[in-house]
Amino acid sequence: MSDKDIIICRCEDITREDIRKCMERGFITFEDLKRQLRVGMGPCQGQTCSELIKRELADFLGEKPDVINTHKTRPLVIGVKLKSIKAGVDNES
Amino acid sequence: MKAEIVIIGAGITGVSIAYNLAIQGVKDIVVVDKSFMTSGATGRCGAGVRQQWGTKGNCIMAKKSIEFFESATDTLEYDDDIEFKQEGYLILATTPEEDELFFENVRLQNSLGIPSRVCNKKEALKVVPYLRPESFTSATYCPTDGHLNPFKMTDAYFQKAKQLGVEFLFFETVESIEINNGKITSVTTEKRTIKTNKVVNAAGGYAHEVGLMVGIDIPVYSENHEILVTEPVDKMQGPMVMSFSKNIYCQQVPHGSFLIGRSNPEAKHDHDISSSWQFLDEMAKTVCDIMPKIGELRVIRQWGGSYNISPDRQPIISDVKSLPGFYIACGFSGHGFMFAPMSGVLITEIVLNKPTSLDASDYRLDRFEDKIVTEYEKSVV
């Protein structure tokens, strides 16, 4: 299977080829890849791609996966509608 | 290691300065950053670019910078997409005072060649139909304002600067700047000493600390401004919608997601960039007040970033009388991204002792010495 057909981040449709090209451009940390390709920034917040990208980075850098840092975890844990947040505020007051 | 000039900070400002120095023929340029590129305010900003300001200095910086963005891909021969969307900013007035102020602002903007205009309610609703009509009184609109991808824009400068021979040192922290007989002699990081006589402070949120390394107390501070992003949806909004009195800016980026932010009037002056639930609560209330339709969207992530704020909310782009060879580009007060093209040009002209391409006296460091701040930019979220 070619790198073009291997989807790494399904939220943003990023393939293994995209990841490798970006690493060759000099972006060799997870935070850099995230900012160039939006991996880990979609609705699943990297729950699918982060381990795969960690392995890609390790492979590219000749390191063991466990020394590669993944991206910062940010709130929210799951997507919440703005109007639901407002409804929550209204209920409390 | 030796350098003609060392730039501290690889955000958009530092990278733009590096590029501009390089195209003017300066060799041995080194950019140092304590983390990865755009790790500070650049990578955290809303990335809108607007020309609708209340002070002349900000208007001119913005106008010339947008002219650069319009042809940046060609100028920098960038092989990727900077995702420039030029569909305007719609700024809502919600009080009689704002109606009046914005009228004056538009007059100033028009006098400087910025194509902004005052809109009544009906005209504003034509631009963004789902605004709740009761939530504002009038608006101003400038069609050539817009938005672009801060990571790609910085990368465009970065790729070109590298081609031109600029050296970048990432994950390296500047620990001190050495001075001998009133002249800079070197910059020391945890990994090396770089011999140089010239240093540019483009350290964004940490510009004050870098100033202190050479004994200069730059009158700026940092504060946390929070922002959120929604799930991507089909295109529904052209312009950025903004209100200073309601404390919101809201933009749909070409990717489909909405970026929505506000400031916290109680934010402390520090380097906090954490996320709070209070921000989400306040943001949700304001969004549902102005644009109930956007309330249907899911928030998928929130984060914070530092505004580096100056006393008059205008940038400091300047050399320093007491320390030749030290240059400052900071205090952008939340607008460093959109002014970066001109920041790079101006610092380069100052470093090379050339006449500046616009009157840079409004941005000088010594404007604060007499303690009289003549103008104050009110058009800030």
Image (cartoon, rainbow, N blue to C red):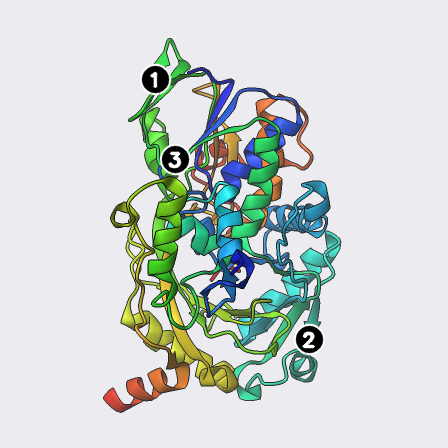
Q: Quickly name the residue at label 2.
A: B119
Mark 3 chain: B
Mark 3 is surrounded, within 10 Å at the Cα level, by few (under 14), some (14 to 19) or many (20 or more) other residues, namely: many
Work out whether mark 2 precedes mark 1 in sequence or the reverse, and give the earlier one.
2
Q: Which one is in front in this view, the residue at disc 2 or the one at disc 1?
A: 1
Mark 1 chain: B
Q: Secondary structure at mark 2?
A: strand
Quick one: B39 or B332, which is closer to the camera? B39
Q: Position of residue B124 (x, y in %)?
A: 66, 79
Residue B225 to residue B126: above or below = above
Q: Position of residue B186 (x, y in %)?
A: 38, 17
Which residue type does callout 1 highlight?
Glu
Q: Quickly name the residue at label 1.
A: B178
Compared across the picture, whether B361 is left or right of A69 comes to right
Q: Quickly name the residue at label 3.
A: B218
Q: CA distance from mark 2 to mark 1?
A: 55 Å
Q: CA distance from mark 3 to mark 1?
A: 18 Å
Q: Position of residue B278 (x, y in %)?
A: 29, 72
Which residue type does callout 3 highlight?
Ile
Quadrant of the rendering where the C terminus of chain A is positioned: bottom left
Outermost residue on the bottom side: it is A91
| Quadrant of residue B114 within the rendered picture | bottom right
Q: Secondary structure at mark 3?
A: loop
Whether marks 3 and 1 lie on the same chain: yes
